[in-house]
């Protein structure tokens, strides 16, 4: 039955409120707000030709409309936002978020722990952020470790140490677990770290200069040297990105960029004057919508989320009719005055341009692919609150213990990153001991990344069972990289694809994914690439050893003569078959050296 718009509109109030449009199956099609309900709803039924294609399709499906009156337009906006999040109607522009924002968390222990945090803030302590992605948090953690040497380890690890871990050895932790730093000095260091996170770098430097002078006067030269190093590093940082912003401001740059049928809302975050990076969102149900409509819908849904921090200032790239209303609602929600501006100058204008450029790049990279579908399914099946940004996978390859090589392949949100692949020639382990080989490769990889502030993965895949998984846990625990999720992939009894058994670090029982699961296909894709890369490198290493080692063991044969021999005889087998007279024909090979070469191969 067609919706009787005229009879319905006769009884609609002129007051502010929210309206819900339903279809014949009593499902909500659209939720909207209005300063004047009668005026807004009438606009849907006056002249269908003036409506967008999307709204014409919406009106054609309406079976009945319900309204909810509110005291003010502000209340209507809040109620609209709540209803959209609850029912997610198909004709509303919806914020789609693949992952939650990470925070930097400083615990309230006697010796506070510094770590990455996602999800509900239910632990006592300080939360700093939000950061746009895990990479930005890792960079901050590594920076804070260098400067203040705070612990990252879990409590059970901290409480049972009898000697300092690798973090102490590489000067990233002051080892409070074994009493290498007293409580008073550690707490002072924590206070300095908080000041740093609040952007008060010069205040820290002034404090550290005083501490350095005081400890030096007291002949505590080790402590004085520690403060001296901190001062030097902080001054070095002042020449870099973080210190080039004089104002200690908190703001977000939020822009909408629409290209064909894809819209990207990009957020660039500044906290305490520090640029933390940016992140793109791709709202759903935007067909026929303009950039202004998408941006306005996004701002209310995004900033009215539970536990979402609202900065003091929001810079947008479009002039919005809803700006006064949004300022009122967000200011009330944050319990302080919030500014929304569509004009910027100076460094803020540069940030605005940067956000627009990032949005353009993100749209190009957001084209749907089979890989992205697999990645999304993988995150869903593991119950992750975020879409993995970086996955690393290790595999070991050898032939009966000969030329053992470990491979590391890297995948990000767009697929394989060949430029980040690494191989490790394993040395000084028992032939065929895959667990020891895996341990060596992982230690070399992640100790170096830790020391050099490299990009760490969200997920670490290990091609192997419990043994290799255990080695990965040991290494990452020692390096205090507890935020990395570790998964072991073991071949099933039949060793056929689709029968893999998965082991998640920290869980007793193994698990499996269905054969047709995109998540399993992702793991197979990455595992097979690691296997291919490992075998390729193993063959190269084995060939190199077999070609070079026999000739290298002969006294008087250097790199130049070795190359001449191999080139002249077409490889090592030709050299082995050559007689003394043949060998003498090579430039630089004397009769005595020819005899040595001949005897070397014919005595074996």
Image: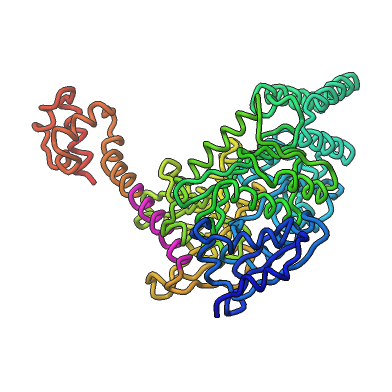
Q: Is 279 located above or below residue 72 in the figure?
A: above
Residue 247: image x %, image y %? 75, 27
Left or right for 65, reference 571: right
Number of numbered callouts drawn: 0
Name the residue at 54% across, 49% down.
290
- In the depicted view, which residue is nearer to us: 414 or 351? 351
- Quarter of the picture containing the N terminus is bottom right
Question: Is 535 within the magenta?
Answer: yes
Name the residue at 73% across, 70% down.
11
Name the residue at 64% across, 27% down.
241
Residue 352: image x %, image y %? 60, 34
The quadrant holding residue 582 is top left
- In the depicted view, which residue is nearer to us: 328 or 567? 328
Name the residue at 51% across, 72% down.
512
- In the depicted view, which residue is nearer to us: 587 or 53? 53
Q: Is 365 located above or below residue 556 in the figure?
A: below
Left or right for 233, reference 288: right
Q: Is 15 located above or below residue 23 in the figure?
A: above
- In the depicted view, which residue is nearer to us: 257 or 290? 290
Residue 237: image x %, image y %? 68, 26
Question: Residues in magenta?
Answer: 518-537
State the scheme by which the image is colored. rainbow
Q: Can residue 225 be spotted in the picture?
A: yes
Left or right for 149, reference 287: right
Q: Magenta residues: mostly which secondary structure?
A: helix
Residue 202: image x %, image y %? 79, 24
Question: Is 62 within the magenta?
Answer: no
């Amino acid at each position: 039955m067609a919706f009787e718009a005229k009879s319905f509109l006769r009884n609609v109030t002129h007051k502010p409120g929210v309206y819900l449009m339903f279809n014949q199956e009593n499902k909500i099609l659209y939720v909207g707000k209005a300063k004047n309900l009668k005026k807004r709803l009438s606009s849907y039924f006056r002249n269908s030709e003036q409506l967008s294609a999307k709204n014409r399709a919406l009106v054609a499906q309406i079976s009945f409309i319900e309204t909810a009156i509110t005291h003010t337009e502000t209340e209507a906006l809040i109620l609209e936002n709540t209803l959209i999040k609850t029912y997610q109607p198909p004709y509303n522009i919806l914020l789609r978020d693949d992952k939650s924002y990470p925070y930097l968390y400083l615990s309230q222990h006697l010796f506070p722990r510094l770590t990455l945090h996602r999800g509900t803030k239910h632990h006592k302590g300080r939360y700093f952020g939000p950061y746009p992605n895990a990479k930005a948090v890792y960079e901050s953690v590594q920076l804070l470790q260098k400067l203040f040497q705070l612990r990252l380890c879990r409590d059970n690890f901290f409480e049972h140490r009898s000697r300092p871990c690798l973090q102490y050895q590489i000067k990233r932790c002051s080892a409070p677990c074994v009493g290498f730093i007293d409580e008073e000095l550690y707490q002072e260091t924590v206070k300095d770290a908080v000041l740093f996170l609040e952007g008060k770098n010069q205040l820290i430097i002034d404090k550290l200069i005083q501490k350095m002078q005081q400890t030096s006067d007291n002949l505590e030269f080790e402590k004085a040297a520690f403060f001296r190093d901190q001062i030097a590093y902080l001054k070095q940082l002042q020449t870099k990105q973080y210190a080039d912003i004089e104002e200690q401001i908190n703001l977000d740059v939020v822009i909408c960029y629409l290209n064909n049928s894809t819209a990207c809302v990009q957020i660039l975050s500044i906290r305490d004057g520090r640029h933390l990076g940016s992140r793109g969102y791709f709202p759903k149900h935007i067909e026929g919508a303009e950039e202004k409509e998408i941006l306005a819908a996004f701002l209310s849904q995004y900033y009215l989320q539970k536990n979402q921090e609202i900065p003091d200032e929001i810079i947008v790239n479009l002039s919005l009719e809803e700006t006064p209303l949004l300022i009122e609602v967000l200011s009330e929600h944050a319990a302080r005055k919030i500014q929304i501006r569509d004009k910027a100058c100076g460094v803020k204008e540069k940030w605005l341009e940067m956000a627009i450029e990032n949005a353009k790049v993100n749209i190009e990279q957001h084209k749907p692919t089979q890989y992205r579908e697999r990645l999304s399914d993988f995150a869903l099946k593991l119950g992750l609150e975020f879409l993995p940004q970086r996955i690393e996978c290790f595999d070991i390859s050898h032939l009966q213990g000969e030329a053992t090589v470990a491979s590391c392949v890297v995948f990000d949100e767009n697929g394989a990153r060949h430029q980040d692949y690494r191989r490790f020639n394993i040395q000084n382990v028992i032939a065929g001991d895959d667990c020891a080989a895996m341990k060596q490769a992982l230690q070399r990889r992640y100790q170096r990344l830790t020391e050099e502030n490299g990009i760490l993965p969200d997920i670490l895949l290990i091609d192997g069972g419990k043994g290799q998984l255990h080695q990965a846990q040991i290494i990452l625990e020692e390096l205090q990289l507890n935020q990395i999720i570790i998964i072991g992939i073991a071949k099933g009894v039949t060793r056929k694809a689709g029968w893999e058994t998965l082991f998640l670090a920290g869980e007793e029982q193994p698990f499996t994914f269905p054969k047709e699961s995109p998540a399993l296909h992702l793991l197979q894709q990455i595992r097979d690439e690691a296997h291919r890369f490992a075998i390729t490198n193993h063959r190269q290493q084995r060939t190199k050893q077999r070609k070079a080692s026999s000739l290298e063991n002969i006294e008087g044969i250097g790199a130049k003569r070795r190359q001449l021999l191999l080139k002249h005889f077409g490889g090592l087998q030709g050299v082995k078959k050559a007689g003394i007279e043949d060998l003498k024909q090579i430039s630089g090979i004397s009769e005595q050296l020819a005899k040595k070469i001949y005897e070397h191969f014919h005595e074996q």
